[in-house]
Amino acid sequence: MKLPRDLNGAVLARRLQVYGYGVTRQSGDHLRLTTKRNGEHHLTIPRHSVLKPGTLAGILKEVASHLGIAKEAELHELLG
């Protein structure tokens, strides 16, 4: 599945709630998300109007790695 080119940070943060991530703080235009699923994990997401494809790919790779799921399955569930 191809990564979307129009996804912003706030929307991604809402979609990551499926995996138990929630916003724990905001500093400037960056959101700090935390989940306790599979152990505590912190993630920082820029709250830009559009996320660059490389940034989005890195965030999704980090989430998939922490949760132990396939990246394709994650893409389909989050962006499907």
Image (cartoon, rainbow, N blue to C red):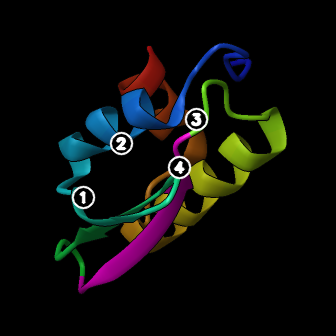
Q: CA distance from mark 2 to mark 3?
A: 18 Å
Report x, y in % for residue 22.
Answer: 20, 57
Q: Is residue 46 magenta?
A: yes
According to the picture, the residue beneath numbered tag 4 turns out to be 70
Q: CA distance from mark 1 to mark 2?
A: 7 Å
Q: Is 30 left or right of 67, judged from the image as shown?
A: right
Mark 2 or mark 3: whose residue is earlier in sequence: 2
In the image, is residue 39 above or below residue 17? below
In the image, is residue 62 above or below residue 7? below
According to the picture, the residue beneath numbered tag 3 turns out to be 72
Q: CA distance from mark 1 to mark 3?
A: 24 Å
Of circles 2 and 4, the one toward us is: 2
The crowding category of the residue bearing disc 2, from other C-alpha atoms within 10 Å (few below 14, some 14 to 19, many at least 20), is many
Q: Is 19 left or right of 61, judged from the image as shown?
A: left
According to the picture, the residue beneath numbered tag 1 turns out to be 23
Mark 2 or mark 4: whose residue is earlier in sequence: 2
Dot 2 amino acid type: Ala
According to the picture, the residue beneath numbered tag 2 turns out to be 13
